[in-house]
Amino acid sequence: MTGKSLSGATTVAVAGILVAFLVAAGCVGGQPSDSSGSQQITVTGSTTVLPIAEKAREAFEESHASAGIMVSGGGSSVGIKAVGEGTADIGMTSRDLKPEEAAGYPGIVRHHVADDAILLIVHPGNTVDRLTLDEVRGIYNGTCTNWNQVGGPDTQIVVVGRDSASGTREFFSEYVLESEDFVKTQEEFNSNGGIQQKVSRTPGAIGYVGLGYTEGVKALALDVDGTAVEPTLEKIKSKHYPISRPLYMLTNGEPDGLARQYLDFIMSGEGQEIVASVDYIPVQG
Amino acid sequence: MKKEQAAPVPFRGFGRFRRPEAGIDPSSAGATRQLVDKIVGKLLFLVALFAIITVFFIIVFLLRDGYQIVLETGVWSFLTGPDWNPAGYNPAYGALPLIVGTVLVTALAMVIAVPLSIGTAIYIAEIAGPRTREVIKPAVELLAGIPSVVYGFFGLILLTDWIRIAFDQPSGSSWLAGSILLAIMAIPTITSVAEDAIGSVPREFREGSLALGATHWQTIRMVVVPGALSGIGAAIILGMGRAIGETMAVLMVTGNAAVIPDPITDVFSPVRTLTGTLGIEMGEVAFGSLHYHALFGVAVVLLVITLVVNSAARLIVSRMQGTARPGPHRALTAVASRITHAASAPFGRVVPPRTSQRGAFLLMSLSVAIVLAALGVILAEIVVNGAGAITWEFLTGTPSDLGREGGIFPAIAGTLYLVGGALAIALPLGIATAVYLIEYTGDGPLTRSIRAAVDLLNGTPSIVFGLFGFAFLVLFMGFGVSMIAGQITLGLMILPTIIRTTEESLRSIPGSLREGSYALGATKWQTISRVVLPPALPGILTGAILSIGRAAGETAPIMFTAVIFSSRHLPSSLTEPVMALPYHLFILTTSVPGASAQKFGTAFVLLLLVLSIYLAAILVRRRYNHAKVM
């Protein structure tokens, strides 16, 4: 039973299994291309843009019963990669393409569907109502560690931010921090909701989030040349509130078929109302 | 996960041998049977190699995307670099704070979990009456069944707040929070393996000790625990393996700041673990960037650490099975006797045996109480807040408004699809591998390497499976984010559990049954399929059920491979992504504001699903344990 010579059999077997493994996987892997002709598209990428895509899908499928739109998250990089490689029909991104991405996928077309602002949020019990950009920078680069340095109570500041792969963090870093490093004790979360929950439960915390995440927290006004600018829709739209960025949907080449209809729907009046209803800034009308 | 469920079952299969074709033997039919036998043997051998191949593929695909970071920074500065700042102006890829974070969180978790688990294990095995045992043992095992994202959810909502207020800290997200959570998660593993070890100390030892006039506690302390020490050591290391590989719970409570606590004993400092780094950064990292490769480098480091821990466990277990008692074992025994001695003589003077017994039993009851309280608090929090959200519409509807309204039916169905597919892949492979290992070979180098591969798979963190599934299935094979990719990933993850439980189950079938079958002229395959497998089925079933529970509750392996945020339809083909309960809960908790009721409702449904699966496993085992007695 145990004395069998296995060396020859082993080699053959390993080779055989490897081939079987790859062939089997290859067969299944070949399937997605078969279904591309049907009325089905996939939308993937930034979790920031996702609420727009999702709500728009719900409304769009009301009127187009046969259409199947599948929306998934994953992050801006996933969206860019997926649309560039052709594994998704529409990508979503909350940042612009990096030079290497633009070079790698020259066919990508950007569709500017909405604008987003980044809010600075604190615990509702915090007495601070406004900060200058310099103060925000001081808090995030670690030179300012107590709320009494910016006119608040004598409480240690708990700095909360996004993970280092996040598009939101990258934008915040470039715009506010002017590419200085974040303070190393910054607590990191991989979502806007995580930051919002953390800040709503921690009296000394400050965080940055997208527009919709204000439940249980207080959004700070920014002090621009001595006047406090509240992050209201009008102020953001008129660019008085300084920290805002565009949100894109991406297609590989000009869209056609269902992808075209879906994008047109988002850019229509009804679609832009949806954009506003999920707390982003419409770009049309 | 559990070893002892492989209860021998009375043999009921004699009737099957009276069939004519097994007795009188026309030579052509005999030749066919011989041929079938040969082919089956070869096939099983091929399948058994699958575990080795999987391990090989995991290592190859992690290295394939991870080696670039080492080329860029050098091995040494990657491992010992003090800064992890991939998005900085001057990107820094130093994994040291992450490694230190993992070590610290795991170490403190063990400091909390080990005394509690061993106290509980001794209580269950030695002190509790049969009634109490029947309640406590399943309760501890239910702790193992709670999905890790539910733990994280609990930690985020209750634990960090409690730490912030109770210790008057600015923030509760900390090393301590991560360690407490990991301790609760490691307790069931340590307790059940340690309890097995204590239970396997021969009864005669206890009787001898008691007959010499020793008290119950003296017997436990001087005879039972030293006798079970190697098993307890293995239990601790297995629990440690679970703690190191945990992702979803840890990343929700540790704060994820990549710093080394200053001073190093500051348990309230935020820390970041290797797994947490993968969990929060993998989703959005730019493909092919240095950061992406650095994350795969982190995964390799994580794999190596778990490999070391698991090899240590293997070594200890093999020591335990051998008769030799080498140096390390003696040292361990000495340490254990010092500790128990100190426990029973707290002021340097030996207190009367009765008093020390009372004190020791009190401490053990206390540890049981703490463990049960932890279970109670978690269950109560979720049941109280979640039961209200359960309506017919919630269970059968589809989500709308980002999950704030509507139901979670596609997520329930998706979880069942994923688990069903994983089982369809892992069950045949696992059973075939186990049959080959037990019935076809002895203890050769090949068998040993297959077993080592299975152990390695068993210790591989679920997030590493997720990364492998992403790199291999989603990208390399071009499956995309799809149900099939998730099913295969989950299938690989539960494969070792199925192999191990099936092996245990087959081992418990007495050799005389096989010999009887051969003596009647049956071939090897006839013997296996008609004599050995039927009575081993209950054990295999328990293994399968336990794996279902694990697969249903996992988030990390599917979040990069199979899941979708929201879907109105059920998937119509294997290449479409699906919704899944654990991921839905993760997203509702971290990314959707104002979905509190749905959040608790989803947690409740997930908990109910996984716990009822575990309960089924416990019932199956109990039923067959009773059968054994009768």
Image: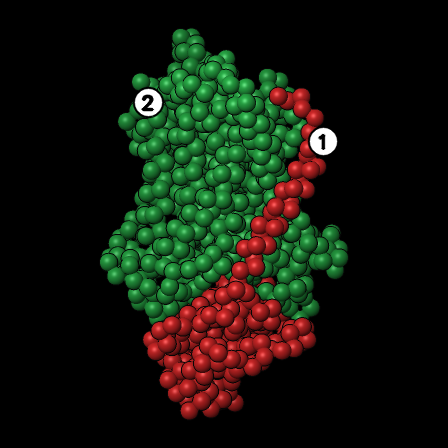
x, y percent for residue B407: 31, 62
Q: Chain of mark 2?
A: B
**Marks 2, 1: nearer the viewer:** 1
- In the picture, which quadrant includes the C terminus of chain B? top left
- Residue A7: which numbered mark, if any? 1
Which chain is depicted red? A
**Which residue lies at the image location 64% right of the left edge and 74% below the top edge?**
A105
**Which residue lies at the image location 35% right of the left edge and 26% below the top edge?**
B624
Q: Chain of mark 1?
A: A
**The quarter of the displayed image where residue B206 is located:** top left
**Which residue lies at the image location 33% right of the left edge and 22% below the top edge?**
B627
Q: What residue is shown with label 2? A: B627
Q: In the image, what residue type sits under mark 2?
A: Ala
**Residue B351, relative to residue B312: is it above or below?**
above
Nearest to the observer: residue B262 or residue B607:
B607
- In this orientation, does residue A101 appear? yes
Secondary-structure class at tag 1: helix
Nearest to the observer: residue B451 or residue A215:
B451
**Label 2 crowd bin: few (<14), some (14–19), many (20+), radius 10 Å:** few
Nearest to the observer: residue B4 or residue B575:
B575
- The tint chain B carries is green
**Residue B507, relative to residue A256: is it above or below?**
above
